Amino acid sequence: MNPVARRELQERFRTIRSPLVLSVWVLAAGVVTFLAFVVASNSASGQLRNVTAAGLGSVAAAASIGRFVLHSLLLGMIIAIIFVVPGQAAVAVVGERERQTLPLLQVSQLSSWRIIIGKLWSALAYISLLLIATTPLMVIPVLLGGVTIGDILAGLGMVAVTAVMVGAVSLWVSARATSMQGAVLGAYVWTVTIVIGAMGLLIAEFFLLEPEDMGSERIVSGLQRDEGRELYSTWINPIIGMVDASAVATDFRTEIVASPYRTFQGPLLVRQGFAADAFDRLSLRGFNDFEVFLERGFRGFPQPGSLPGVSVASNVPPIRGAVWPRALVFQILVTLAALWAAQRKIDVPRPSRRRKARRAYAT
Amino acid sequence: MIVEFESVKKRYGKVQALDGADLQVPEGAIMGLIGPNGAGKTTSMLIITALLGRDGGRVRVGGIDPERDPLAVRRHVGYMPDFFGVYEGLRVNEYLEFFAATQRIRPVARPAVVADLLALVDLEDKADADVNTLSRGMKQRLSLARALVHDPDLLVLDEPASGLDPRARVHLRELISELHRMGRTIVISSHILSELEGLCSHMAIVDEGHIMAMGEVDDVRAKLFGHRKVTLRVAGAGIPEAERVLRGSEHVGDLEVYRNTIEFSLDGEEDESATLVAELVAAGVGVGEWRVERAGLEELFLQLTENGGRLPATPSPGSDRTANSSSAAAADAAEGSAP
C-alpha cells in the first residue's frame, strides 16, 4: 500500500472523530432512505386508490418506490461527494507544506506521482468507506424491485469516478495553494465551477432547443419522436453521467412515484429525439407526472402497455450512444490532467528549472 | 569527492543566493558550512539533496547530477532540515516506520531498522511515545534517525543543534561523531560554531553566494588569518634578549612587551613556532610559558557577520571572491525564501 495513504489512514482512524462521523453518516443515510420510502409509499397509496387492480398495482408501486429510493440515494451520494471530497483533498498537500513535512517526503524515494496518488488515496479512502457503509441500504430498492444490481453498480461506479475527479482537482488546488483556507476555498470554487458550470451549460444548450424545432416528428412505439440533437454539455456533467449509467431514460413508463432523476433525464431524452417527453418531464409544457400518469397510465386501463410502472416502449432504439461513457472519459481526462499538474507542482527539482539549468550550463 | 559544485548559481527572484559557488566535499569528511544568515548554506544543502534546481553551473553528488536523477541521489543522501516535520498522532516507531516505507525498505526489514535507529539515537524507551510529546532534543535525535533510515553515505544536517540545550547539544555532537566513525560523510551547517570547532574535519566559508574558503579546518583558518597570536612569558631577566631574537625573525610581527611577557603574531605553522622556541632557548632565554592561540571559528564568524557578511581584511590567498554589491540583508532574504 502507498505509504502516504497508509499513514494518513492510520492517523485518521486513530481518533474518535472518524467512527463518529461514520456513525452519523450511516444514520443520516438510513433516515433519508426511510423518509424516501415513507414519502414514496404515501404517494403511491394515494395514487393506488384509483387503481382497480390493486394487487398488481401494489407490485408496480413497490418497484416504483424502489427506483425512487435508489435514485434518491445515488443523487444524495453524488451531492455529498461534491461537498465532502474537496474539503478532504484540499488540505492534503498544503497541509504537508504547513507542517513542514512535504520536503521530508520529497527527499525520500517517493516520486511526486506516488506522493500525489497516496494523497488521493487517503482523501478518497474515507469517502469510499462512507459510501461502502451506505451500500447495505441499496439492498432495499433491490428487495422492492424495479432496479437491478447492475443499475446500482453502474450508479456507484459513476459516483466513485466523480469522487476521484473532484479529489484530483482539489489536490491540484492544494498543490498550488499557500494556505489551508485558500486551498479549501479554491477546491470548492473549482468543484462548483465544474459541476454547476456543466449544469449551466446544459441549461443554456437545452433552452436553445424548442420541441417544435426538432425536425419532422413521427410516432415510434406510440411515442412522438424526431431526429433529436446532441447536447454536448451532457458529456461533461457528472450528475447526468451517473443518471444515464444507472437508469435508462428511454425506458418509458408511467411511474406511480416520480423519480428524482426525472429532471436530469430531460436532456437525455432530447438527445434521443423525445423532445416532447423531455419537456413533459421537466414540466415545461404545463404537464406534470400525475397528469401524464392519468392520461397514459389509467385512461382505458388495463390496456396493454399502460400498466403503472411497466415500460410502454422498452425497445426504443437509441439514436445516439449513451452519455455515461463520454462522461466517464471526460472525468478520467480531467482526473489525469489534474493529477499531472499536481505532481508537477511538487516535483523537485522543477523540470522547467532543469532545462533552464542545462541551457545555462551549456552556455 | 562525494559532493562537487562548479560555478553553481541560484537565484530567487532578484536575490542571487548562489553566485558561482565552488564546493568540494571529500568522502569521509565532516564538512562544516559556515556563514551568516542568507549566505547560501541552506540553498547549497537543498541543491545537494535534489530538493532545489540550480540556475547554472555543475553539481555532482556521488558522481550523479541531482537534477538528472534526483531519486538516485536521494538514495545516497540523508537530509535533516532545520525544522522538524511532525505528523500528529504518530508514535515514534510509527514515525520512523513511515519514513522507512517512503525509502522503500521492505516491510519485513522495517521493525529491525527502526529498533537499530532508536538504539543509535538513544530513544528506545520512547518508541511508543507520541512524537508530539518529545522534547526538542529528542525530536532532533529522532530527526537524525529519520535521515538515517535508508543508511545513506552522505548526511546533510542543516543547523542540527539549533535551539538545543547544552546537554542535548553534547548528545547530538557525540552522535554525529559516532556516525562519522561509522564511515559517513557529513555536511553540517550551524551557527553554534563552538559545536563545529572540534567536530569538523573540513569547512567551507560561505558568504553572499560564494564559497570564500574551503578545505581542512586548520588550513582554512591559517589561510584566513595568516598568523597565530603567541604569548611568551620569560623566566628571569631575558626580556631584551628575547625581544632581540623575536625581532630578528621574519615570521614575527606586532610585537608588544609587557613586563616579563611578550605578545606577538606568528606568521607560520608548527615548524616556525618550534624553530623560534629553539632560537630563544639557544640565546639563553628562559621560556617560562609559550602559548600559541589560534583564531576560533567563533571569532571568524563574528568578524564575518560584523563586517556585514564580508571577510576579514586578509582574505584567503587564491580566493576568487569578487566585490559583490548585494547586501547581507538581501542574502538573508534569499535564505528565508529558500523552500
Image: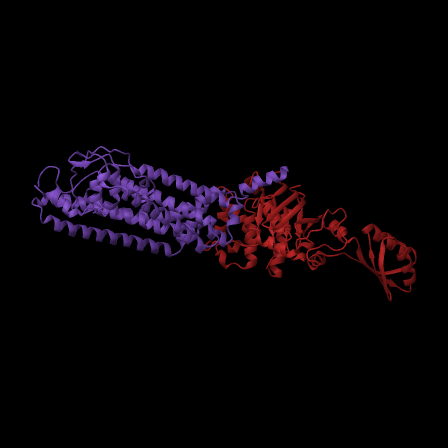
Is residue B182 at all visible to an observer of this figure? no
Residue A106 location (% of width, % of height): 52, 46
Q: Quadrant of residue A273?
A: top left
Task: Reply above or below: B60 against A191.
Answer: above
Tell me the quadrant of the picture where the N terminus of chain A can be found.
top left
Residue B254 location (% of width, % of height): 84, 59
In-front residue for pair B27/B173 = B27
Left or right placement of residue B318 versus residue B152 in this view: right
Residue drawn at x 92%, y 57% as measured from the top left: B283
Chain letter for purple, please. A
Left or right placement of residue A152 versus residue A360 in this view: left
Residue A119 location (% of width, % of height): 43, 47
Residue B258 location (% of width, % of height): 85, 66
Q: Describe the colour scheme in one phrase.
A: by chain
The image shows a total of numbered marks equal to: 0
Tell me the quadrant of the picture where the C terminus of chain A can be found.
top right
In-front residue for pair A118/B336 = B336
Left or right placement of residue A330 versus residue A152 in this view: right
Chain B colour is red
In-front residue for pair A295/B339 = A295
Task: Reply above or below: B126 against B65.
Answer: below
Residue drawn at x 58%, y 41% as measured from the top left: A356
In-front residue for pair A24/A343 = A343
Q: Quadrant of residue B153?
A: top right
Is residue A72 at all visible to an observer of this figure? yes
Q: Residue furthest bottom?
A: B259
Residue drawn at x 86%, y 52% as measured from the top left: B275
